[in-house]
Image (tube, rainbow, N blue to C red):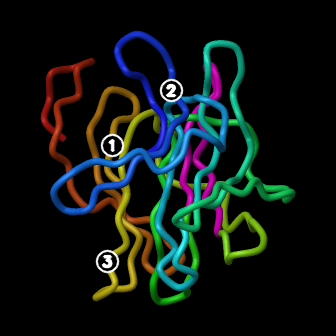
Amino acid sequence: LFGGWNGKQLVGDTWEWDGRTWHLASSEGPDARAPFAMAYHDGLGIVVLMGGQDLERTFADTWTWDGSTWTQLAIDGPGPRGFHTMTYDADRERVLLYGGREDDRLFRDLWSWDGSRWEMISNDGPVRRGIYASAYDRFRGTLIIHGSGDLVDESWALEPSTWTWAESSGWRESDGARR
């Protein structure tokens, strides 16, 4: 567990759960921030953190956690953003990052991190989203995202390079209709 808002301020500490108790693992590393994204890269055995915001700025930095130390990577990649989502694609051994926002600008880009560099895969994902989650379905080889965009909660799947609408579970507040 890293950072976030503790009810009073942004924090930048790292905690680990041993199955019974939380332990402070580090108070060094990325600046205190919130709506960042993290994913565990199983192939490398590290956690990857990208972006987020504090009270004055939006970050575009990438960090890794090896279980004892945070390391900031000197690489180019996605621009500054928060409220994005990241998940691990076990089939291709890469972390996938989708969307997010910076101020009033919403993104619908998809990025891949292979352990050494970020690569933009596409810039034409489904509806731009501000808050959502993602998962990788290894059985189907599919990235799934779910979240809100234009006041609608939706799920989309990327199979293998085409986005398809997967399900609707929310109300369109603008017209009260179920999608």
- Quarter of the image for residue 164 reads bottom left
In this view, the residue farthest toward the top is 8
**Closer to the N terminus: mark 1 or mark 2?**
2
Q: Position of residue 2 (x, y in %)?
A: 47, 43
Q: Look at mark 3 in the image and give the residue it sits on.
A: 137
Asked whether the residues under the numbered discs 3 and 2 touch, taking CB atoms below 8 Å apart as contact, a structural biologist would say no
- Residue 139, relative to residue 175: is it above or below? below
Q: Which residue is mark 1?
A: 147
Q: Amino acid at mark 1?
A: Gly
**Can you tell which of label 3 and label 2 is closer to the viewer?**
2
Residues 103 and 52: in front is: 52
> x%, y% of residue 109?
63, 53
Report the residue marked by disc 2.
11
The magenta-colored residue range is 97-112
47 w.r.t. 103: above or below: below
Q: Secondary structure at mark 3?
A: strand
